Amino acid sequence: MLSRLMSGSSRSLEREYSCTVRLLDDSEYTCTIQRDAKGQYLFDLLCHHLNLLEKDYFGIRFVDPDKQRHWLEFTKSVVKQLRSQPPFTMCFRVKFYPADPAALKEEITRYLVFLQIKRDLYRGRLLCKTSDAASLAAYILQAEIGDYDPGKHPEGYSSKFQFFPKHSEKLERKIAEIHKTELSGQTPATSELNFLRKAQTLETYGVDPHPCKDVSGNAAFLAFTPFGFVVLQGNKRVHFIKWNEVTKLKFEGKTFYLYEKKIILTYFAPTPEACKHLWKCGIENQAFYKLEKSSQVRTVSSSNLFFKGSRFRYSGRVAKEVMESSAKIKREPPEIHRAGMVPSRSCPSITHGPRLSSVPRTRRRAVHISIMEGLESLRDSAHSTPVRSSSHGDTFLPHVRSSRADSNERVAVIADEAYSPADSMLPTPVAEHSLELMLLSRQINGATCSIEEEKESEASTPTAAEVEALGGELRALCQGHSKPEEEQVNKFVLSVLRLLLVTMGLLFVLLLLLIILTESDLDIAFFRDIRQTPEFEQFHYQYFCPLRRWFACKIRSVVSLLIDT
């Protein structure tokens, strides 16, 4: 009996897994879950730990062994979704950005959204012009260090904190000036609320970027916001489609389709897994922001005529239901333990990266920008051309705008620099090679590379030999890119082959059924009824019997020839 109990306890221990979730303030929450625990169980544990009631805006994100990001599905097993070896590591993030963050009922919810947007600002996902950037950073300073105090805050104190991927001395002075003169007396809650109101007005608010390419091969970032679907290229928002104008979302392999009332937008993701993740995010965001009730949610399929494809269903409440539920919350406001901001050199968890002022000016422009993002600026990516996909039997349609107002709605300058968000999970070191390539690409285009218009000294200019060498490498990298046109041709050929295979299969089944009806002695009621119909008897005696005799004659002649030879 003792051995039986010991074996049972060992089996139960094997069914428990350790999970670590990184929170928005960079702290960690560790718990143990059972093997068959659903995502909802882990999420509820986390929300209970955070004392969070307005939890529908948040989710748990993880990265699979293939480095693809996913949102944890609450109706499925945690262990089966992660497909990695324990202990499991995940991140708690905002999944659905509130359309009006100031309307959130509880301060704890606003604080968590504030932490998410502050993270977006640092990662380069919330891109804005210099004046807006200074105001946002000043609100962060006021919320986390309080009023300006000459005794505690010496000259240049704002330069010790990291707000953006790139800083400049002029921007740091502007941040300090706003903090000193305009925000004195604001409590942390008030500063956070003003920060949210300011961030909400930006074009890239709520953007969770998905890197893709358009039909011309130009790099683009696709995203879903509380207000609709957006496409970002360079420093412009080239497309904005409201949720009520989106009629269908679909993907096939690495190709993503968005159906509007008049056009079909086509983009290409890096991998089929990334395209499926993009499609699922679109389905969830459209259901959350567009529908009136969760009972209206339907299962969505990416299948076509011949293949099953993927099926997905959003399993949560919609935005309107969340707001109605929040209005019914009646409890004492929970205590908030704010993590005060400290200088970046002493707290890597706040800065997520090196201080820019310690980087030489010749390299300051290219921090947190990769080779691929450098290549992006070499192309004319100011506009994206939507097409009607040839695989759907439609023809090419240029996207022409007839009025200035409509053009301004679709194409809007979002910042002083190109949109190039960094990795949202962990800081990625920038290689020396990447910095030089980015400098070259920016010089070729003659574009400013800082977050504000700061002139660089001539000492930072590469020599002619360096330009020629790096230019050759850029051309080699460009030639190595996959061409969307070739992918379209391959997809068309595959579709034709699939159609031929299905047609041949149907013909084979019909031939087999015909042979069974005419040659077999099966006395089944179904076959007997068919044989007794006048049409079948006419077909049998007028067409099938002569055809059978002709085939038999040909076969006998061939056999006789083979015997004679």
Image (tube, rainbow, N blue to C red):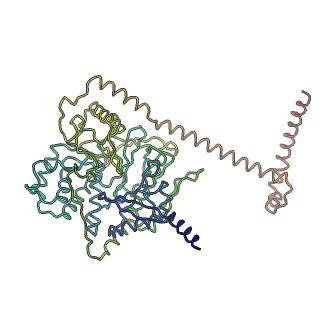
The image shows residue 174 at horizontal and vertical percentages of 14, 48
Going by the image, does 547 lie left or right of 93? Answer: right
Query: Which part of the image, by quadrant, shows the C terminus?
Result: top right
List x then y, in percent, for residue 274.
45, 48
Most distant residue in the front direction: 2
The relative height of residue 177 versus residue 9 in the rendered view (above or below) is: above
Horizontal relation, residue 496 to residue 203: left or right = right
Position above or below: 464 against 59: above
Q: Nearer the viewer, residue 378 or 463?
A: 463
Q: Nearer the viewer, residue 378 or 516?
A: 378
Q: Is residue 239 above or below residue 376?
A: below
Residue 186 picture quarter: bottom left
Query: In this image, 2 relative to 400: left or right?
Result: right
**Residue furthest to the left:** 150
Question: Is 89 placed left or right of 98 in the picture?
Answer: right
Tell me where residue 176 appears, x and y as whole percent.
13, 51
Taking depth in this image into account, of 548 and 353 the one nearest to the observer is: 353
User: Residue 454, how many percent across, how many down?
Assistant: 18, 38
Task: Please report the residue visible at 28 percent of the width from the left and 69 percent of the height from the top.
Answer: 105
| Number of marks present in the image shown | 0
Question: Residue, x 44% and y 49% (percent of image)?
Answer: 68
